[in-house]
Amino acid sequence: MSQKLVRCNLKKLLDERGMLQKELARNTGIRPATVSALYTGKVRHYPADVIERIVNELQLESVSELITIIDTEDDAQE
């Protein structure tokens, strides 16, 4: 049985642009701790205002460039 997981691609997006986490935080007004949580994948929730600020700052065409859903296989055998 597969399970769906939500993943944030912020690390990839910042690396592609040569942008540091602290630059993103400064340019968007997002707390550095929040940027770090998104960057490392340790975020527990995705506040809409934070996502909007990142999408606008990075000039993304779609939120799906930032947040993706992936399928995983459940390790449990039925």
Image (spheres, rainbow, N blue to C red):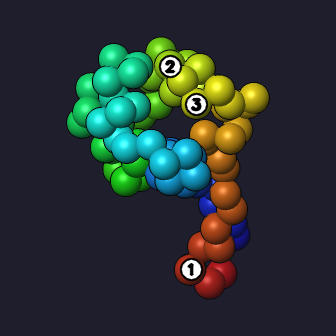
Residue position for label 1: 76
Residue position for label 3: 58
Q: Nearer the viewer, residue 1 or 14?
A: 14
Residue at the spot 66% in from the left edge and 49% down from the top edge: 69
Give the image quarter of residue 30. top left
9 above or below 60? below
Spatial separation of the CA atoms under disc 2 and disc 1: 39 Å
**Which mark sits nearer the N-terminus, 2 or 1?**
2
**Which mark sits nearer the N-terminus, 2 or 3?**
2
Please state which of the two labelled residues, at mark 2 or mark 1, is closer to the viewer: 2
Residue position for label 2: 53
12 above or below 78? above
Residue at the spot 45% in from the left edge and 22% down from the top edge: 50
Residue at the spot 65% in from the left edge and 81% down from the top edge: 78
In-image side of 7 versus 36 (left or right): right
Badge 1, how many Cα within 10 Å: few under 14, some, many 20+?
Answer: few
Q: Are marks 2 and 1 in contact (CB under 8 Å)?
A: no
**Which mark sits nearer the N-terminus, 1 or 3?**
3
Residue 43 visible (yes or no): no
